Image (cartoon, rainbow, N blue to C red):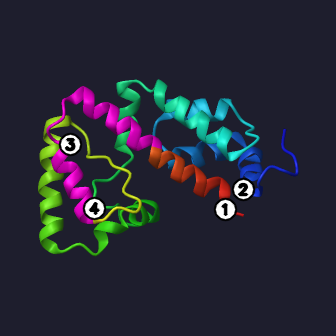
Amino acid sequence: MTSTSTPPGLARFNALEEHAAFTALHEACASTAWVKRLLAARPYATPEALYAASDAAMAELTADDLAEAMAGHPPIGRPRPGDPTSAREQRGMAGASEALKAEMLELNLAYQEKFGHVFLICATGRTGEQMRDAVRERIGNTPEREREIVRTELGKINRIRLARLVEED
């Protein structure tokens, strides 16, 4: 299905050997179920087809699958050392004041205590203050409501990460 109209990055992804493709997708999202669904649908004709497959796979994830995906994300304000992806995505917290960082740590811990997982938000392009305000607002949600917000936020993150994967030349 690969043709001259397939963008080079997507053609490269489509041509990856199964294990390499699994690894690349797992770096985008730590849910094994999501990765397997996307692998099963290769090759993709367009980036949009890949994003649509990602969205469909996200919609089908169980609570356990979502928990597995969330486990791959560090808390906001504390990207893993040596992890350029989370550092880039959380850039809005990098220049935050010590007071804001301390407040985010407290809010992250309270959120994790309530919901049993890290606070997850598509942090790309957001300021530290916007992320703080979002956790303040969302901590009042029911677990069911929060799970659906997390699913939506994960979907946004996955699309951004997939775009980086297939749009690089």
Q: CA distance from mark 3 to mark 4?
A: 19 Å
Residue 145, above or below 133: above
Badge 2, how many Cα within 10 Å: few under 14, some, many 20+? some
Q: Pointer 3: what residue?
A: 138
Q: Pointer 1: what residue?
A: 168
Instruction: Name the residue at 59% across, 53% down.
Output: 163
Q: Magenta segment: does it hold 138? A: yes
Q: CA distance from mark 2 to mark 4?
A: 30 Å
Which residue extends farthest right? 4
Q: Position of residue 9 (x, y in %)?
A: 72, 56
Q: Nearer the viewer, mark 3 or mark 4?
A: 3
Tags 1 and 2 in contact by the CB under 8 Å rule? yes
Q: Position of residue 168 (x, y in %)?
A: 67, 62
Q: Pointer 4: what residue?
A: 78
Residue range (magenta):
128-155
Q: Secondary structure at mark 2?
A: helix
Instruction: Name the residue at 71% across, 49% down.
Output: 13
Q: Quarter holding the N terminus?
A: top right
Instruction: Name the residue at 28% across, 75% down.
Output: 95
**Label 4 sits on what residue type?**
Arg
Residue 43 appears left or right of 100:
right
Q: Position of residue 143 (x, y in %)?
A: 22, 29
Q: CA distance from mark 1 to mark 2?
A: 5 Å
Point out the tag, 4 or 1, that comes first from the N-terminus.
4
Question: Which secondary structure class fits the magenta region best?
Answer: helix
**Label 2 sits on what residue type?**
Gly
Q: Secondary structure at mark 1?
A: loop
Q: Pointer 2: what residue?
A: 9
Instruction: Name the residue at 75% across, 38% down.
Output: 43
